[in-house]
Image: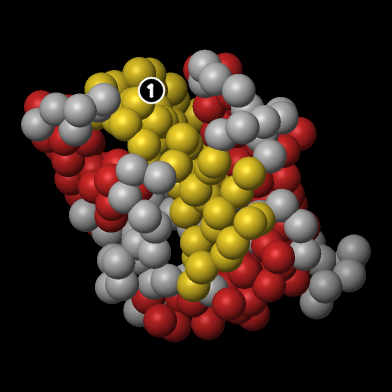
């Protein structure tokens, strides 16, 4: 169903079908979803791409036209399109779904697009190469393991930014993921890998798939990689 007759309930039913699948099955699900991903996400009032692009832009210092952005879990290229509207011009994308990368290629914004299943394969990015590293929406249980955060940091240039957003699923595993993630973020700061710039809550991340008229919450983080 890819026309305008698709409803919120249609999308919720579709998303529920991906529950309790493994990572490989999840990527096949995203392959199937790629063509209607953005329109469905709008129906679900998914605000993380807009919020996170604006969050980075408000706290970024530097020439937006010149910086190289690594868009991790880039999906259809939605975040890159929003960042391009803010003046960012150079993007490299990484995603685990071939279907999503095909949609991202249609934007014409990416200098390169790379297929990788994060957590099971190394992040395909050169160390110390990117002025900005973005990951929006994928930092959650069953998606991207907490260990990938270090790879994001390694990919950034010294002094570069790492911008992340995370949803708070209403589940025990989601709560555990949040605790583990924030413990790792602090540990990396204690180790001198980066410094915390700012964090900000999102009170309406997206509609809750399982509960009518309720929204999920989320958090955005911005770190700056150490110079040495």
Q: Compared to 47, does 24 lie above or below?
A: below
Image coordinates of residue 86 in percent, x first then y, are 71, 29
- 155 relative position to 133: left or right: left
Q: Residue at x 19, y 33 (%)?
A: 193
Q: Give the residue pinned by disc 1.
A: 199
**The N terminus, quarter of image:** bottom right
Let me know if residue 9 appears in the view: no
- 201 relative position to 42: left or right: left
Q: Compared to 42, does 210 lie above or below?
A: below
Element class at badge 1: strand
Picture mark count: 1
Q: Residue at x 44, y 83 (%)?
A: 25
Q: Compared to 183, does 55 lie above or below?
A: above
**The C terminus, quarter of image:** top left
Residue 67 found in image quarter: top right
The coloring applied to the image is secondary structure
């Amino acid at each position: 169903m890819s026309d305008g007759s698709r409803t919120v309930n249609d999308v919720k039913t579709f998303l529920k079908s991906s529950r309790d699948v493994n990572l490989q099955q999840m990527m096949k699900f995203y392959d199937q979803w790629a063509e209607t991903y953005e329109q469905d996400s709008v129906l679900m009032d998914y605000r993380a791409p807009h919020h996170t692009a604006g969050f980075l832009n408000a706290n970024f210092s530097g020439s937006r036209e010149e910086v190289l952005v690594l868009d991790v879990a880039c999906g259809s290229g939605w975040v890159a399109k929003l960042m391009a509207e803010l003046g960012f011009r150079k993007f490299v994308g990484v995603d685990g779904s071939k279907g999503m990368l095909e949609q991202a290629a249609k934007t014409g914004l990416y200098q390169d697009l790379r297929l990788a299943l994060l957590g099971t394969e190394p992040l395909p990015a050169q160390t110390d190469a990117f002025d900005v590293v973005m990951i929006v929406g994928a930092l959650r249980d069953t998606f991207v393991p907490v260990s990938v955060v270090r790879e994001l940091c390694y990919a950034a240039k010294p002094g570069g930014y790492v911008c992340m957003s995370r949803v708070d699923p209403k589940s025990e595993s989601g709560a555990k993921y949040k605790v583990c993630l924030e413990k790792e973020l602090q540990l990396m700061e204690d180790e001198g890998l980066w410094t915390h710039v700012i964090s900000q809550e999102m009170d309406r991340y997206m509609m809750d798939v399982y509960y009518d008229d309720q929204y999920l919450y989320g958090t955005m983080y911005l770190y700056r990689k150490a110079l040495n």
